[in-house]
Image (cartoon, rainbow, N blue to C red):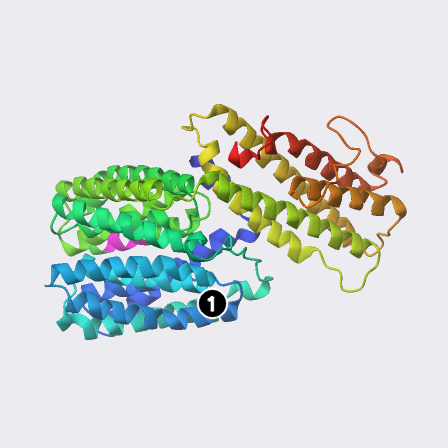
Amino acid sequence: MLKKVFVSPDPGRSRLRFAARAVLGIGLAVVVCGLAGTSLVGAIIGGLAALLALFTVTDATVRGQAVTTALLPVAGLPVLTAAAALHDLPVARDLTFLAVVGAGVYARRWGPRGHSLGVFAFMTFFIAQFLHATTDRLPEMFAAVLLSVATAAAVRFGLWCYERRRPAPALPAPPAGTGLARITTRQAVQATAGAGFALVVGQLVSDDRWYWAVGATWWVFVNTTSRGETLVRGFRRVLGTVVGIGLGFLIAVPVAGAPVPTAVLAAACVFGIFYTAAVSYTWMMLCVTLLAELLYGLLGVLGPGLLALRIAETGVGALGAALAVLFVLPVTTHAVTDVWIQRALRCVHACTAEAAARLAGTEGADPAPRVAELEQLLGRVRMSVAPLVHPLSPMHGRRRRARRVLDLLDDCAREIRGLVAVAADPEASHDARLAAACWRVEAAVEALTGKGAATAGPVRAGGTSDARAGGPRAAEPALAHLHDLERALAELAAPLRSPSGSRLAGA
């Protein structure tokens, strides 16, 4: 856990900028709400709205991010109105909450924008329960949400828009399908079922804090696509919450809502949420838990009993998610893993073809966007394979093969980056050996993805190929990268297929 956060690479200091901007944006949003005369409740809902606006909006372009941010109140304010109006009608409130859960997950079929709006709608309903919102507070809450989203947007797109200086990331689309074959549809059903279980059992545990269980179920489903991913995420959520509760006894309880220490610690928690989100869900949940404890301290209700209750409700929510993914339209880990591995390999094929065209002098050939796409796809592969390589996984054979696949795919990505760097050199030139090596790489990918009858070419682990026939490695960097890429693809054939001939994911 420590290594993931403090040793993980941060190219361009993007995580650091992401976290620092969040502290600035949320802090300014709270200040603006205070200057507008809102109460403590209004300031809290404003700060949380700003946090969501800065955290959940992930469109590929700055323009797309701005549009999605502008649409957040459109999705959130009607839900906030419904939550406040149904505050004293438990049955209608609960059914509406479950409808929001299902719609929020289903909205992911429309990509990052649908995901962002779905999360904001759900969290608006959740925050209304957190603050016990009633209709008489709606004007203040509306003002706080609008002011905070506008302030967050001003910071993100005006004061500190570091994304404008970077190419738009290539966000991989989720696996396709129709009806119940579409993963987002199945997850919407699963999340609603799991949230229903969490809601009922959570209310048996506590009439006041039952929504914690529903929230735990919801967040377990965010950014997951398979049964294994969801179970691992549930485990990490419980672990992060338990550790966060332990820190709460040491930090939040002694602070007891004192304004200045609470503000400083809340800023540190916000920084931690944004800085660790990309590398460790456990650390992120630790920071989220501690932030919630500090907010409860401001509201004057924090105590040991409340912290123990949060652990219980989180456990109920994680159990609801686990039961849902195991028994309600399950999406198996092996099916999702196979899809992402195949897409990553096809991207290797496309990167090689673009690099070869660039070396040949083809006008307009640019492998750089393909490399960015490959990085995104490898991130999805790591996420989908996480259940197989988890230390607690009892299937040691599959764990070894999965780790081998990840290592070899990382080797492929490293050689592709090297090849692209060579192709970017204006003095680099094309010859027949480069063409032959590129063809062999493409044939190897086609063999691994089942797209053709070709084999992985003459390269075998420990063997040689024509790619090295032209001279020493230092003299032919492009050929050297292609040779190592061939080797990695050839070695991938063994772990990708079990002795029975099925792929790793289905082994």
Whether residue 127 can be seen here: no
Residue 373 spot, x, y in % from top left: 60, 53
Task: Describe residue 275's horizontal placement relative to residue 192 as left or right.
Answer: right
Whether residue 312 can be seen here: yes
Residue 68 spot, x, y in % from top left: 43, 69
390 or 162, which lies in front?
390
Q: Which residues are magenta?
A: 260-267
**Amino acid at the residue labelled 1:** Gln
Q: Which residue is pictured at 13% across the width and 64% down the height?
A: 87
Task: Describe residue 160's horizontal placement relative to residue 129 as left or right.
Answer: right
Q: Which residue is pictured at 47% across the width and 52% down the height?
A: 16
217 or 167, which lies in front?
217
Name above or below for residue 144 compared with residue 300. Answer: below
Task: Describe residue 316's horizontal placement relative to residue 91 as left or right.
Answer: right
Q: Which residue is mark 1?
A: 65
Q: Is the N terminus in the top left, top right, bottom left or bottom right quadrant? A: top left
The prevailing secondary structure element of the residues shown in magenta is: helix
Residue 125 spot, x, y in % from top left: 24, 62
338 or 28, which lies in front?
338
Image-quadrant location for residue 494: top right
Q: Secondary structure at mark 1?
A: helix
Q: Is residue 437 magenta?
A: no
